[in-house]
Amino acid sequence: MRPKEVVRAWVAAFNAGDADRLAALYAPAAVNHQVAEEPVEGRRAIRSMFEREFAAAEMTCIVENLFEDGEWAILEWRDPLGLRGCGFFHVVNGVIVFQRGYWDKLSFLRQHGLPVPAS
């Protein structure tokens, strides 16, 4: 699959809350770095991360823009509550080897009624 196709499959799996389908889109040694969090390394750890996140909050990714440049796909997204962000996906041989995402963690926590860490 081309990078845009992989990200379309990623969005479908994310919106279904399917951690197994999401994990299958990553290379075994992939890295997922949401800049508001520490990087998560490895397919199993990425699957666990999604499983925890889906248990904590109902999340939906609405695609605003999806671009492709060589081995990279760039996703600009929003959710139904108004949160916006973007993700960069490095796709090699049809699997994600690296992902970086940017979004406002404080807004996310407040929107979902989750505890805000003390600073």
Image: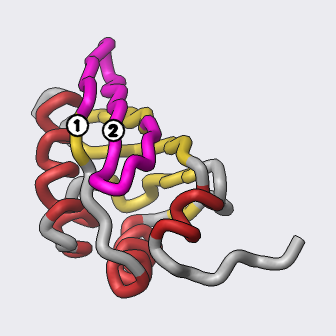
**Closest to the observer: 79 or 89?**
79
Which disc is residue 63 wearing? Answer: 1
At 54% across and 46% down in the image, what residue appears? 103
Q: Quadrant of residue 106?
A: bottom right
Dot 2: element: strand
At 39% across and 48% down in the image, what residue appears? 82
Please provide percent x and percent y for residue 96: 33, 45
Which disc is residue 77 wearing? Answer: 2
On the rendered structure, is 14 left or right of 72?
left
Dot 1: element: strand
Residue 35 falls inside the magenta stretch: no
Task: Judge whether 59 appears above or below 5 on screen.
Answer: below
At 57% across and 69% down in the image, what residue appears? 110
Question: Which residue is the extreme one toward the right?
Answer: 119
Q: Amino acid at mark 2?
A: Trp
On the rendered structure, is 111 left or right of 71?
right
